[in-house]
Image (spheres, rainbow, N blue to C red):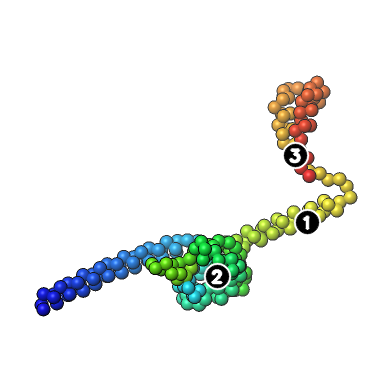
């Protein structure tokens, strides 16, 4: 009947309107999310369930050397030759939905990078796994500096250990503080110490042998 047809038509129009509104809101939300991700100085990559790259922000372009057009589509771990504890990562994602730790990747120019990264599991509305969102920060220079410091410390320790004479490290900070607070400025230090043996004992007791 015409009444039934009119009712169906209204239902279709109403459904289409709601879908249009939802679609516009969804696109707006994605656009806002994308702008937020672009503001990050860290790399942000979104992968699907097969590890194919869906999103690649400006930070990733700058750090890794591939443009967004080149990076979107290939396998993330193959493109970047990622070295990471796979079993540990997938177990953590399965149990907790996220994992954080250090990984090693290779830039387009062949240089290797050490990264602090966090991976968060993506799920659809039904709770099914649909991929991973990751954010990473470059630790390469920091780790190199740490290695140089450790190497320097080790070198000097070997020099001290192999020296043919006694070496020790002491801290006289507290001793100096006690002597400065206790002695009147107008009195000669040698004379004052000779007349105040208890201060001398306190200064000696406050000295610390560190090594």
Q: Position of residue 46 (x, y in %)?
A: 47, 69
Task: Answer whether labels 3 and 1 touch (C-beta < 8 Å).
Answer: no
The residue at the point 55 percent across, 75 percent down is 79
Q: Which residue sits at x=74%, y=56%?
A: 152
Q: Callout 3: helix, strand or loop?
A: strand
Q: Which residue is mark 3?
A: 171
Quadrant in the rendering for residue 186: top right
Horizontally, residue 106 falls left or right of residue 97, namely right
Q: Is residue 5 above or below residue 194?
A: below
Q: Earlier in the sequence, mark 3 or mark 1?
A: 1
Indicate the secondary structure of the residue bearing disc 2.
Answer: helix
Residue assigned mark 2: 64
Q: Earlier in the sequence, mark 3 or mark 2?
A: 2
208 above or below 189? below
Q: Give residue 29's position: percent from left, percent from top.
A: 36, 64
Residue carrying label 1: 155
Query: Could you tell me how far apart the alpha carbons at marks 3 and 1 are, in whole angstroms?
Result: 22 Å
Checking the image for residue 131, the label placed there is none
Q: Quadrant of residue 117?
A: bottom right
Estimate how packed mark 3 is, as few (under 14), some (14 to 19) or many (20 or more) residues with alpha carbons within 10 Å. Answer: few
Whole-percent x, y for residue 72 in the image: 47, 75
Task: Measure the alpha-carbon separation of dots 1 and 2.
Answer: 34 Å
Q: Position of residue 169 (x, y in %)?
A: 78, 43
Give neighbour class at mark 1: few <14, some 14-19, many 20+ (Cα, 10 Å).
few
């Amino acid at each position: 009947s015409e009444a039934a047809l009119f009712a169906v038509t209204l239902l279709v129009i109403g459904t289409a309107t709601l879908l249009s509104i939802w679609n516009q809101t969804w696109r707006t939300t994605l656009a806002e999310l994308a702008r937020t991700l672009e503001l990050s100085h860290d790399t942000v990559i979104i992968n699907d369930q097969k590890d194919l790259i869906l999103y690649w922000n400006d930070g990733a372009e700058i750090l890794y050397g591939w443009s967004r057009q080149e990076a979107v589509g290939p396998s993330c771990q193959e493109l970047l030759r990622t070295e990471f504890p796979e079993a540990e990562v997938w177990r953590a994602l399965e149990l907790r939905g996220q994992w954080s730790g250090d990984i090693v990747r290779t830039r387009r120019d062949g240089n290797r990078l050490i990264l602090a990264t966090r991976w968060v599991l993506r799920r659809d509305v039904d709770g099914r796994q649909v991929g991973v969102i990751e954010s990473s920060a470059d630790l390469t220079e920091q780790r190199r500096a740490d290695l140089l410091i450790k190497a320097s410390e080790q070198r000097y320790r070997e020099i001290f250990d192999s020296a043919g004479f006694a070496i020790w490290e002491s801290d006289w900070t507290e001793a100096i503080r006690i002597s400065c607070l206790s002695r009147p400025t107008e009195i000669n230090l040698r004379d004052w110490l000779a007349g105040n043996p208890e201060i001398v004992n306190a200064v000696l007791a406050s000295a610390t042998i560190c090594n």
